[in-house]
Image (cartoon, grey):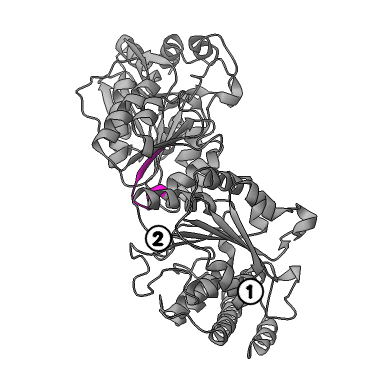
Amino acid sequence: MVPLTLPELEKTALKIRRHVIEMIHAAGSGHPGGSLSATDILVSLYFGNILKFDHRNPKAEKRDRFILSYGHVAPAYYAVLAEMGVFNEDLLLNLRSLDSSLQGHPSKVHADFVETSTGSLGQGLSVGAGMALALKSKKAKEKVVVLSSDGEQNEGSHWEAVMFAGHHSLGNLNLIIDQNCMQVGGMTTEVLNLEPLAEKYHASGWDVYQTDGHDFRRLLTSLSNFNNKGNKPRVVIARTIRGKGVSFMEGNEKYHACTLSEEECKRALNELVKG
Amino acid sequence: MEKSMRDAFGEAMLELAEKNERVFGLTADLSSSVRLEAFGEKFTNRFFNVGVAEANLIGVSVGLALEGFIPFAASFAVFLPGRCFDQIRVSVCQNKANVKLVGSHAGLSNYGDGATAQSVCDLALMRALPEMKIICPADANQVKKAVFAAAKIEGPVYLRLSRAETPVFTNEKDLFSFGKAEVLRKGKKLTIISCGSLVYNCLKVGEQLDAEVINLHTLKPFDRETILNSAKKTGKVLSVEEHSIFGGLGSAVAEALAQDPVPLKMMGIADSFGQSARSYSELLERYGLTSEDIAREAKSL
């Protein structure tokens, strides 16, 4: 696929955000705040050609492995996959319905395109590290990309994997942190301070890049460092805004997990019309 | 002859990895305790000591499994499954990942270290998980067969091992039928059902009392048919396990018998943790799991 131009990326992201709102409204519950902060990252990965991925064959052996470690932002992920053509857009409104492949959190048992079931925080990077080891062992050229949140950085098991990846020189393992600075209980600095986050990764043997998670030009420049080579895993810490794109949701803790009323849905969609 | 199941596990892993190049061995800094040292020296590219990090041990194993390998992740049963239940619930079972979990030093067999190191709740944890299969071999000979059987099964398996030197009494040449309760001795007076090394004690008691003795080496899937047939035939059942009386083998038997009632007495560790002792047998005595205890309960049924 030819990567989209910057205006095209903006336009696609707007469409994804509209889907996110409509999906969560239809489902009656979900996580709009994180889904909207993750949207530009996900759009960059798939439409900016950071991931080697064939929508006609999402489980092709020669694909980059992508793990959405903080599974609760699944609506944005599903919307991106639908937009890529993995499945029909109509399916999106089945989010969280009985027997749907679009479970509230990505489920490998329900959806074949999912690499690993996630939703319980602190597990994605470990599984990604195992996949990275496996790919190295098979001498495969593909890379592993894990998307995590700053809230997930609280999990001790995540840091077990950070140390493991550094120690084993997993140069084919790549991580993005959607740093919207908020978690369920409030600001990350108030709940459990992570700083200095970049230094922690440095100290564990990782290459660290910091960027603006809503500026496609800067985001793509940082993400283009992702590869399968070298002897250091790498992390892109992307500063984002929870609820990005919808004024009344931006930085508003009410919109971590919630239902979206008809009125809220309408107001949000009205804002998501032009870039 | 006595032999520890963990020794048999180490030997079986060497043989299995020789035959099957998809087999990996992983541990959380307990290579010597789970007898994976020789494996690590021989198969340097297929062995990982992830450090004292059981949650990551599971995640890394899942990653390997999803890419087509067959990882055996081994630690003490208190830590695996004890410490990483959620990783097993989500990353192993909800992915149907082909990971083999090996919980060594199960039950009271780590007698010296005390309650923190003694695993008396692991079966309850693993039984509750969809997709999980549970094998609890009765002796060293059966461990080897169980390791090979686990490698052939597609999906999650929990293999429960004892640290203790225990009698080797099953025949090396006998077939191991995964999923099938093994009637070791036919009898008329009652049915004694057990798993793990206590099966040996049960067998001795069975000979004294003309009891039917069943080695339920596969706890899940549960061989309901064999258990119910035997229970109906003898009319009385005694379950014996080195595990809490809640949620383990006895509970599995009770669940089946509750729908088709036959009197059942459950022997196990009565809602308590273990403690330190100078020998394994001292603990079996304290918690009422010796041959004499089993015989007494069998007679009182």
Residue A89 visible (yes or no):
yes
Q: What residue type is labelled 2?
A: Glu
User: Mark 2 = which residue?
Assistant: A142
Q: What residue type is labelled 1?
A: Leu
Q: Which corner quadrant of the image does residue A20 belong to?
A: bottom right
Residue closer to the observer: A221 or B25 = A221
Q: Name the spot of residue B121 as percent of width and height, x first.
A: 53, 32
**Marks 2 and 1 share the same chain:** yes
Relative side of A199 to B39, left or right: right
Callout 1 environment at 10 Å: few (<14), some (14 to 19), or many (20+)?
A: many
User: Mark 1 = which residue?
Assistant: A36
Q: Name the spot of residue B281 as percent of width and height, x first.
A: 48, 10
**Residue at the outermost left position:** B173
Residue closer to the observer: A131 or A206 = A206
Vertical side of B92 occupied by A147: above or below: below
Vertical side of A131 occupied by B14: above or below: above
Residue closer to the observer: A110 or B53 = B53
Say which of marks 2 and 1 sits in front: 2
Q: Do the residues labelled 2 and 1 touch (CB within 8 Å)?
A: no
Q: Is mark 1 on a helix, strand or loop?
A: helix
Callout 2 environment at 10 Å: few (<14), some (14 to 19), or many (20+)?
A: many
Residue range (magenta): B64-72
Residue B180 visible (yes or no):
no
Relative side of B141 to A134, left or right: left
Vertical side of A138 occupied by B126: above or below: above
**Residue at the outermost right position:** A190
Q: Which corner quadrant of the image does residue A187 belong to?
A: bottom right
Relative side of A179 to B270, left or right: right
Output the chain of dot 2: A
Q: Name the spot of residue A140 as percent of width and height, x first.
A: 35, 56
Q: What element carries label 2?
A: loop
Quadrant for the C terminus of chain B in the image: top left
